[in-house]
Amino acid sequence: MSNLDLRPQVSVCGGRAAVAAEPVRELLTGRQVLLGESTEVRRLLPNLGRRMIGAWCFVDHYGPDDIAKEPGMQVPPHPHIGLQTVSWLRAGEVLHRDSLGSLQTVRPGELGLMTAGRGIAHSEESPREHARFLHGAQLWVALPDAHRATEPAFDHHTALPVVTAPGLRATVIIGELAGAVSPGRTFSPLVGADLLLDAGADVTLPLDPSFEYAALTMSGGAIVDDVPLVPGSLLYLGCGRTGLPLRADTATDLVLLGGEPFEEKIVMWWNFVGRTGDEIVQARMDWMEGTRFGQVRGYDGSRLTAPALPPGPLKPRGRVR
């Protein structure tokens, strides 16, 4: 998925300065962003109050949207560097194409994991014949410096491990939770898990105290560490937790995000994660001039044009169309 802001801001993220070293309850509100022709998302990360959660650097929550008479998600070909995209659906289907030649429909409960590494381009769209509702989350993971130039890849996993407790079913999307390990490739210690809570559930989920965590409410109404959450909200929980109290009066779906605090400083702009402004400028130039990222074949439409760079230190030193 792309950041389709026409005027994307530069975000400097990472480092331990902003990490809460103890348990906290910090409720983050998102902003509405139009994604493609008919999909509006709630952008929860990066946020003015919080830039990263472990290596997680971008969180969009969308739906549930009734797209029975709409084209649904239509995100034209666009580039990425320095990150992984994690696609997670609760309803609907998304057709993924990329410059490696991948063509894959991702469905609810399946992991679509794209490693951009040194550079990849992809598109995402609702199939022509699609389900009535579309509901999901799109997340980015920043790659650590040692791996951010790795070869690009796309992986699709339909069988993911599950952790259960009375009133709880937790699917480990990526990383590790309570001894269950996802088959998705990771490059830093982290976790992403879908938590389904039954009505009346009252359970404590075991956590790693060295991780920082946040909980994204997908549907229902969970009470997380005594904080009531509505759908589309993100509760930052800090570090130092060995367990997370969860309650639900109605059937509820949460996504738990966590990881070791990301030590490195990163620069995010548009769909790029780098370390310097010059690196971002070069990636934009490569996309605009048709080098480096390859072609996405089969998408019915034009690829995205990169937004203009903001004034200041990111000003390009070479020719950019």
Image (cartoon, rainbow, N blue to C red):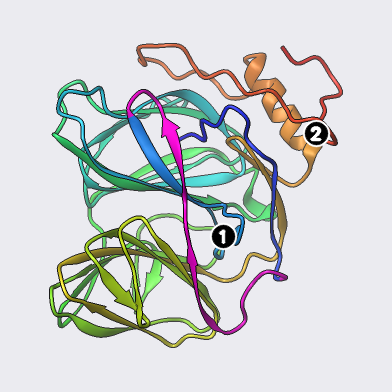
Residue, disc 2: 314
Can you say whether 7 is above or below 51 in the image? above
Marks 2 and 1, the one that precedes in the sequence = 1
Residue, disc 1: 55
Can you say whether 66 is above or below 232 in the image? above
Can you say whether 280 is above or below 302 in the image? below
Q: Which residues are magenta?
A: 17-38
User: Does any portion of residue 132 appear in the rendered image?
Assistant: yes
Residue shown at the point (71%, 21%) measured from the top left: 285
Is 102 on the left or on the right of 241, as rendered? left
Asked whether the beta carbons under mark 2 and mark 1 sit within 8 Å of each other, the answer is no
Residue shown at the point (47%, 81%) measured from the top left: 208
Residue 262 in percent (x, y) is at: 64, 64
Image quadrant assignment for residue 35 = top left
Viewer-closest of 153 and 144 = 144
Mark 2: give few (<14), some (14-19) or many (20+) Cα within 10 Å: some
Residue shown at the point (71%, 60%) measured from the top left: 264
Give the total number of marks visible in the rendering.
Answer: 2
206 in the magenta segment: no
Q: Amino acid at mark 2?
A: Leu
Residue 217 in percent (x, y) is at: 33, 62
Residue 101 in percent (x, y) is at: 40, 24
Q: Measure the C-alpha gap from mark 2 to mark 1.
A: 24 Å
